[in-house]
Amino acid sequence: MVTSVNPVRGPAQPELGPSLPEGVRVRVLRTAHGDRRAAAELASALTERQLTGLDPLPAQPPVLPRAYRQEVRALPDTTRRLLLLAAADQYPVDTHAFLRAVTAARLDTRPLVTAEVAGVAHATAGGIVFRDPWTRIAAYETASVTDRRAVHLLLARVLRGEGESPRRSWHRGAAALGPSRRLAAELRAAAHTARTAGDHALACALVERAAALSPEPSERARLLARAAADAWRSGDADRARRLVAATDDDALGGLLALRAGNATDAFDALLTAAVRSADDGPGPARTDHPQHAAVHLLARATEAAIYTGDLRRCREAAAVASRLGIVPPGTLGGLAAAFEGRYDDARDLLKAAAGRCGPGGDPTLLIHSGIAALMLGDHTAATTATVRAAASARAGGDGVTVPQAMEFRAYADFWTGRPRAAEAATLEALRQAYTTGQDNGACHLQAALAMFAAVTGDEDVCRERAEAARSYALARGLGLPAALALFALAFLDLSTGRFAASAARLRALAGFGPGHGHRAIRHIATPHYVEAAVRTGDTRVARAAHADYDHWARTVRSPDDLALSARCRALLASGAEAVEHYRTALDLHASGTRDFERARTELLFGGALRRLRHRTEARDRLHSALEAFEHFGSPQCAAAARTELRVLGEPVSPARGADDLVARLTAQQLMVARMAADGATNREIAARLLLSPRTIDHHLRGVFARLGIRSRIELVRLLGER
């Protein structure tokens, strides 16, 4: 490809404004095809609602492409015709037919030399490679309607191979002069073929063109809704939102609000769409069977209720399902029962939902199975269901569902003691969520990353991610990520000895409601609240919280929940009674999967044994906890175990691998150090980790201080030795 400086763009690439929300920034760069000058121009023209992510972005910057058009118009007509043919073969649908078209029309390709000299495009064995996407778009859009129609007909004529019928239909539709029922029907059929093959981007283009060629307004609206659904599943959220704005489809509007808008509004729209689907027939976005469509929409409404943490809405959705004669989908019935305190009913309903996690199922329902398993304390089943949900989504070309599955898999990874491995997977899911316009899901993932950072000792990262998640969540009525972020901060306080601050945060989680807290996080937080409350000497509220937690644990019979309840009883007791409760807790942990919590129970037990002067057993428990915390990469908890051992007078080895300078870094510092050693700038590192440049600068200063170095050159040498 030509490497000379683009005369249109110039050598400078301006930066986007630092105040631009991360989700908007990622999508602005995607819309601008990675061109930072085009992205800066686009960002400067956004409305207030577009800047905050509430409205879709424009399809392209308003001014910059004009310069590209002028450059293409300056080329000879014969060169422009070849470039038009290549552009039509690539934009907006890639059809791979340029060389066949050149051969069929016996075109002279020598004029392409002019394009190469101008640095616009160059020829390869596989076809024409444009300098950049804007040049390709300009080559197409500067041509006359007549010339465009001619090249589309030529490309359609040569696309006769197996599996090429959808792309042939695309070119036939693009060449149409006006409305045509016959061509619209052909494009709809071609879209169905593409959709079945998992190519939702192609299906979207085909259905959108079918809408343009359909003479009936009602049919156009229906097709635009179908195109919006395909755009959404292909990961192009802005295109989906632009298309759905031309329809009155509650289902799609609710789905888009669920992933990027106000969760309460999403719930209302999705519940309305479910009722309409059951009463009037299927909507364009889902299945041909109205009952199936209603079930799916109720599942989505359940997700909205989960996000808000609103008990009233859970009850409302369950009542609608009952009225429609539909078995409540996924976790809906179990959530409503659990939130109302009907724990026996909740257990049975959640077990039924968790059992529907076979391979190859509907990704949404598999995610619901994972959520149900999480509530039941079965993290193995939760991991299985969410992994299968992601695999099923990928197989169907439904990339937007993959980060949704990771939102809930993160909980299982946290509890089973895999924070560092889970952090990398969650960070990738966060990128996907932002790229596909799922800012609500990104908020939830940010809160999960704050939770991982709390465990791995990255205090600055924990605070930055938690504050970002809470700020966004409270503005969108997202009780779940708001509460999870608060829990991450509370856990950080607890593990660093700030017990009063931790107790205050955890007590706040006891009050849940739309946009503020969440019953599920209250459940997760209770064992830690009891610990913080005991440390501060104020256990009145904690005892009541534990009584409710114990009721749930005894109902669902989860070994880990029962173990944590026994740990709470030990903390609230004293002397020999406490020791017996700790032993019970550890026996139960042996049958569970929360290895990290087992280590915390050993730490607390070891401290209690030390105070009772049971030195030998205390030493054994504390060494076991220390080894586990070092394995999990949890430095604060490991430090607490070392402190207890020193009080015992036990010689304690330094932190594992302390002779290795790299081992002195936290997980996040090590990641930053490696990127810096590879030559990445602070801003580039910030973009990769989805953190602020200020935080990266702070991390690097910490790296230099811990390693006793002063420059990146020393960092490169030091890391190169390991």
Image (tube, grey):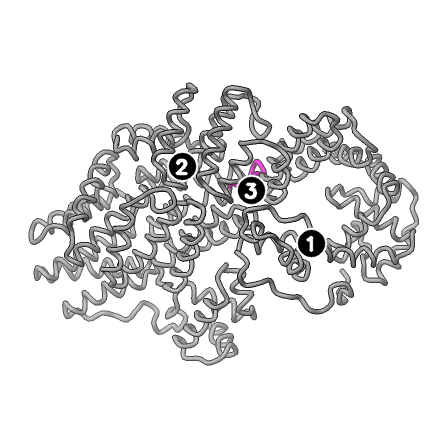
Q: CA distance from mark 1 to mark 3?
A: 26 Å
- Residue 276 image offset from top left, x and y in percent: 51, 24
- Which residue appears at 25% of the width and 61% of the height? 626
Tell me the magenta residue range.
Answer: 395-401
Percent from the top left, x then y, of residue 75? 88, 57
Do residues under tags 1 and 3 come within 8 Å of each other at their CB atoms? no
Q: Secondary structure at mark 3?
A: loop
Label placed on residue 61: 1
Badge 2: residue crowd in 10 Å (few <14, some 14–19, many ≥20) = many
Q: Which mark is residue 582?
A: none
Judge from the rendering whether residue 304 lies leftward or rightward of residue 71; answer left or right: left
x and y percentages locating residue 6 in the rendered image: 76, 64
Q: Nearer the viewer, mark 1 or mark 3?
A: 1
Mark sitting earlier along the chain (3/2): 2
Question: Which residue in the structure is indicated by mark 2?
Answer: 305
User: Which residue is depicted at the point 21% across and 53% down?
Assistant: 601
- Mark 1 vs 2, N-terminal side: 1
In 3D space, how far apart are the residues under numbered discs 3 and 2 (Cα atoms)?
A: 23 Å
Whole-percent x, y for residue 260 in the image: 51, 44
Q: Amino acid at mark 3?
A: Gly
Residue 154 located left or right of residue 569: right
115 or 323: nearer the eye? 323
Classify 10 Å Cα crowding around label 1: few (below 14), some (14-19), many (20 and above). many
The residue type indicated by label 1 comes to Pro
The residue tagged 3 is 399
| Disc 2 secondary structure class | helix
Mark nearer the N terminus (1 vs 3): 1
Query: Is 399 within the magenta?
Result: yes
- By secondary structure, the bulk of the magenta-drawn segment is best described as loop
